[in-house]
Image: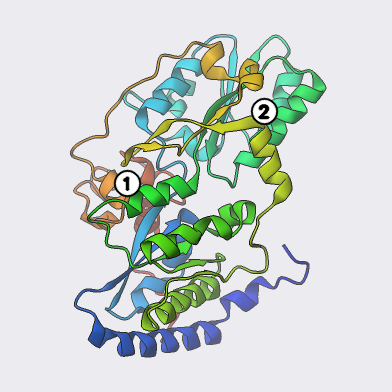
Amino acid sequence: MPHNYNREAFRDPSLVNKLFAIIEATAKRIAPTRTVPITIMEVCGGHTHTIFRYGLETRLPDLIEFAHGPGCPVCVLPRGRIEEAIAIARHPEVIFTTFGDAMRVPGEKGSLMLARAQGADVRMVYSPLDALRLAQENPNKKVVFFAIGFETTIPSTALTLLRAKALGVQNFFLLCCHITIIPTLKALLEQPDFRVDGFIAPGHVSIVIGTQPYTFIAEKFFRPVVIAGFEPVDVLSSLLMILQQIEQGKALVQNQYTRVVTERGNAKALAAIEQVYEPKLECEWRGFGKIAYSGLQLREQWHHYDAERHFRVTPSKVSDSTILQCGAVLTGRIKPQQCVAFGASCTPNTPLGALMVSSEGACAAYYQYQGIQKWSQ
Ligand code: SF4
């Protein structure tokens, strides 16, 4: 982040109001050419959070709708993976470590939080390095880190394994559930009923991968993509850039988040990922089913650190509920409040789906901020 980054400038109400006015004027010019609304998918849960925290959606013209995408890593963790994590955590010699959000995600029979209440040693950490430190401090224990997340977190677990190897730590393991964003977007775009007109692409992931990997979306699927920062001015500027492309009949990859995102990404982070991980043939996602090459696994030379191999985990096949509509929300087909469970049986205190657990989940954002209009007209 540049030293001169002034967060308040990206929340300036007068600039926000100007952007809303330009968006409205642009939408008016586009409207005669449309028979259905323009749907823009914000891929990342961080953007969903900004949209609802600042009430941005409430001031958009009727022509424009947001669809909330699959970029919340906790939300797309399949229930079977939670069951596998719990099975490992129940080993008496294990200290199971995880980011806080994953503690409450429901599996088939419970959560890591419940497993902890029942006696498993499950601990919340803020980084994989904390887990590595625990392994060094507890040589008679096996410390497992629940490695979830997109390219935002993958470099940190790769670098932690490199550190573990350099330090000769033998009692540290990863339960690798990392996923990558590009195959997922491709899978979404290949669905015949996918109606999204453009993408606000994830800022944090793009710091690592750069802008170049999104090119196929513009070239092959003719959808505009704008990589965006996370402040209100970032999101509205990106939305405007997409609308301008639509108005001009263009489909380009543009970078609004130039203060941190480059075309080629972070070479050191990409090299660390490449050294430690390789793509899996297929990976299961909550709400999406299996997507080819969308998950990562440890390369052979890192198998010693692989918790699945070490604890001989039996893959847990747990289907998504047919009543709950997490998958439909994740793919932008319905809004959270259209799920039968929203706000009734599913709330942040009693989450039935992961989208209600994570602060980046669309359902949690709707629940927390519904009705808020931060920017007065
Ligand atoms: S309200 Fe709950 S069950 Fe329904 S989609 Fe959201 S998280 Fe899933």
341, above or below 333, in the image: above
Instruction: Name the residue nearer the viewer: 304 or 191.
Output: 191
Q: Is residue 236 above or below residue 230?
A: below
Residue at the location (34% across, 51% down)? 188
Residue 178 drawn at (x, y percent): 52, 36
The residue pinned by badge 2 equals 131
Residue 179: percent from left, percent from top:
49, 39
* Amino acid at the residue labelled 2: Ala
State the colouring used for the structure image.
rainbow
Tell me, yes or no, if residue 319 can be seen here.
Answer: yes
Q: Residue at x 74, y 24 (%)?
A: 164
Q: Is residue 156 visible?
A: no
Secondary structure of the residue carrying numbered label 1: loop
Q: Amino acid at mark 1?
A: Thr
Closer to the eye: label 1 or 2:
2
Residue at the front extreme, as displayed: 220
Tell me the residue at 47%/43% (across/down): 73
Give how far across and how far down residue 213 sits, in percent: 54, 55
Foreground pick, 305 / 21: 305
- Residue labelled with disc 1: 347
Q: In terms of depth relative to the viewer, which is nearer, 165 or 194?
A: 194
